[in-house]
Image (spheres, rainbow, N blue to C red):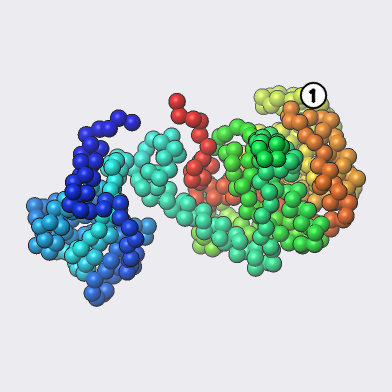
Amino acid sequence: MEENDLIVERKKKLVELKEFGIEPYGRKFIRTHKIAEIKEDISGKVKVAGRIVALRGHGKASFADLKDASGKIQLYFKNDVLGDEKYKIFKKTDIGDFLGVEGPTFRTKMGELSIRVEDFKVLAKSLRPLPEKWHGLKDVELRYRKRYLDLIANEKVSKIFQQRSQLIRKMRKFLEERDFLEVETPMMQELPGGAKARPFLTHHQALDADLYLRIAPELYLKRLLVGGFEKVYEINKSFRNEGIDTLHNPEFTMLETYTAYSDYEEMMEMTENLITFLSREILKKEEIEYQGQKINLKSPWTRMSLEESLKKYCSLEDFSNLEKMRKIAQGLDLELTGKESGFEIGDNIFEKKVQPGLTSPTFILDYPINTSPLAKNKPAHPEIAERFELFIAGLEIANAYSELNDPGEQRRRFENEVKEKREGIERGVDEDYLEALEYGMPPAGGLGIGIDRLVMLFTNSSSIREVILFPQLRPEQ
């Protein structure tokens, strides 16, 4: 970026501050209050610090607005109070500079609570003007690429990330009150597992070994069930080398939990309880609005099988009529290989035709086993998995199933995946995981919740990029 006149002027002031003997990038400043804590009944002096967000000069007196993370307050600088030299130093400050100030509070003639500054320190000189003079950063690409400017200019954005942090804290509270143990599992793995997705490949120099960034922590968390832990969870970063859009980022955050001696029915109940708990705790209500849609989170939530949803919304009565199902799929511009089962085609039709209309919280149950290689099948229907996905406002929020703990059946499914090379992704059989299963893993229910999408829902954000501080972007040209 070429230096414009404003930057040149600010750099000149930087030099002049140094000539005054001022360190323009200061050190520790002890505050007595955050700005939001300042009330008119405070006696004596206060010491606050923050960024200058407005300046108004009147000869030998000036006003400034100072903002910290909690709020904003007006400052009053007067030559008679500060003295000539200190007031000259103040005149070298700009909007964007960080100051620490000290002085008593008072009310102006207009009734505004203010601080009469008796002393101040320059804590950081800003060499670039803030975006659009505080009228807001409008360029979406710039907002994501330079999130720090977005946080300065757009207060609503800062609130989104405060709510995100609160949501994760409350999520931990919910789980820990139910005796879940928080754990950490490897982000670099010898074999990618736990989901069907294309992984990122990296290389470890010291070991001279290729490793994969995890696409899910599932197989390591289930090893912990083998080891004797009965309730575990991880708030994890996972990575998938796939497309980027309003619902997908290559690096994303999930909650995964596993409960021994449980199943997918119990996971449904826990999911419903967790999300309604979060809504009450964070939003103080059980009815929310998302992109113009009012959504009631009160129990009970709708439950229907995948087959029932296709019958209801697409008039599909017979999953064995592959010809009819393929025609419907083609009419929806879905790409098929010709090898899909009726349930697999139905799954694709569901995503295109049914899912967008699932506004109220809806559990869709009983997916094809071919798309659920880590799930137990239903005893009376071996082609169907004991699995559900949760949809709210058309967003897939959660995925869960009764965990497969039969090592022989798990080996068969892994070997089928290797043979089929689905989605063109090379897969290996995770022998270490299979060996762990051979020691015995209790029956269990497992649950994954997309935290980014849940934050989208709670903050009424239309894109996943709005709820990730630094989303992945194309390199700048």
Q: Nearer the viewer, residue 319 or 423?
A: 423
Q: Which residue is mark 1?
A: 338
Residue 257 percent coordinates (x, y) = 70, 55
- Residue at 20% of width from left, 53% of height from top? 21
Q: Nearer the viewer, residue 362 or 175?
A: 175
Q: Quadrant of residue 262?
A: bottom right
Residue 335 percent coordinates (x, y) = 70, 25
Residue 251 percent coordinates (x, y) = 59, 41
* Relative side of 279 to 119, left or right: right
Above or below: residue 99 compared with residue 41: above
Kindly tell me whether residue 57 is visible in this rendering. yes
Residue 179 percent coordinates (x, y) = 69, 67
Which quadrant, please, contains the N terminus? top left
Element type at mark 1: loop
Which quadrant, please, contains the C terminus? top left
Please name the amino acid that badge 1 sits on: Gly
